[in-house]
Amino acid sequence: MKLALYLPNFRTKVTIKELEDLTALAEDLDFDSVWTLDRIVVPEASDRMELQHSFGMMAGLPKALPVAARGEWFQGYPLIPWLAAKTSKVRIGMSIIDTPYRSPGVLATELATIDHLANGRLNVGVGSGWMPEEFAAASAAHIFPKRHKHVRETIEIMQGIWENELFEYHGEFADFESCGFGVKPLQKPGPPIYFSGLKDPKRSAARIAKYNLSGWIGIQDSPEDIKNWRTAIQQELDALDTQRSVDDLVISSMIWTVITDQEVDQSDNGKVTNLLVGTEAQVTDRLKAYKDAGLDMPMFWPPFADVPVAKTLDDLKRIKEEILPKVEAS
């Protein structure tokens, strides 16, 4: 089981020093990867719980973000080259890049440069976004109804630019003649691409097969969710003319993580279930269940509030040094 850290750059209050300390520890503990979070804005309407959609469009969650509109969070994308400079082993990426906020050609060339800065350690996570208010702030309101198509075109453009000396594209969101785009990524044919936010097995299988995607990133998925999703995606892949298998993918999920002194109620409560919140024994048992279900890489996500970074640092050490050996031995 690989381990990943989801940096808490999206918090009402967080410091660069805290992000640096967490990253340094992940590197020291030989984590597979460190990821940042993509958030452009927090609408003031969120403070009043009046967003157009619930958080992440997930059932059971409020129409609000867990960070104040006047919060002092850091943008995730500029942190990626900084992470490249601060580390030498751990892989880096953003979970996930909301492609409608970026020009596909510009994004592709920037990521190629970052892959060189990271000496070939870049992961690329892509998704469509979910918050209309954020699309408006990113001057992309017109894309919201077609955001999934934007993701597809972005993947095609990234792969085309990365794999060809000259490339042209004629689509809805980008239309350009044959051009050179500079340096190609160190990783060939390009950095691994993870996708997120698409639970439709049929469409997911089609993307995996067509674009040779490397991984999938979920959010607060239970072991049962992971097991069911893997089964459904494999059934759809079996129906396609492809050699791809769900076993080829790195299956990951962003999961709120805290080790507590007292046992915590972990009964099913949808996306707000205490999946990896509990005593050392509870977290150990849950990680064993995730391993059995086929979760390849839990992405440990410090909660948005009430858990100091010092506590998270200690929890990460305990997970790697005390809990993981028990999980791997099971």
Image (cartoon, rainbow, N blue to C red):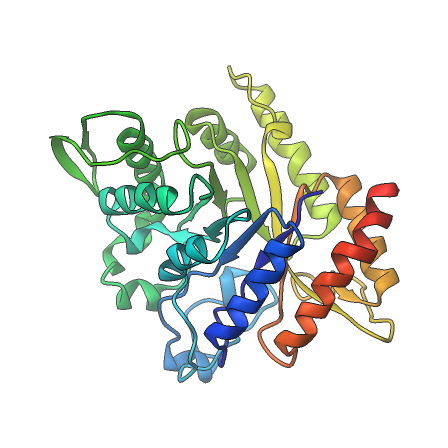
In the foreground, 160 or 231: 160
Judged from this view, the residue extending furthest toward the left is: 177
Residue 112 at what x, y percent from top left? 32, 40
Quadrant of the rendered structure where residue 321 is?
Answer: bottom right
Task: Report if residue 83 is visible in the image.
Answer: yes
Compared across the picture, whether 282 is left or right of 68 comes to: right
Residue located 46% across and 50% down the image: 93
Task: Give how far across and how far down residue 330 sits, in percent.
Answer: 88, 42
- Left or right for 48, reference 291: left
Instruction: Find residue 82 and report its horizontal and vertical position in percent.
Output: 40, 59
From this view, report whether residue 8 is shown above or below residue 147: below
Hey, which quadrant is residue 311 in on the image?
bottom right
Q: Is residue 63 visible?
A: no
Image quadrant containing the N terminus: top right
Q: What residue sits 85% from the left and 75% below the top?
A: 261
Residue at 82% over, 43% down: 328
Q: Is residue 72 left or right of residue 287?
A: left
Task: Identify the residue at horizontal 49%, vertical 81% (top origin).
Answer: 13
Q: How many marks?
A: 0
- Residue situated in front as seen by the camera: 141 or 292: 292
Q: Which residue is more in the foreground, 37 or 46? A: 37
Indicate whether 91 appears above or below 284: above
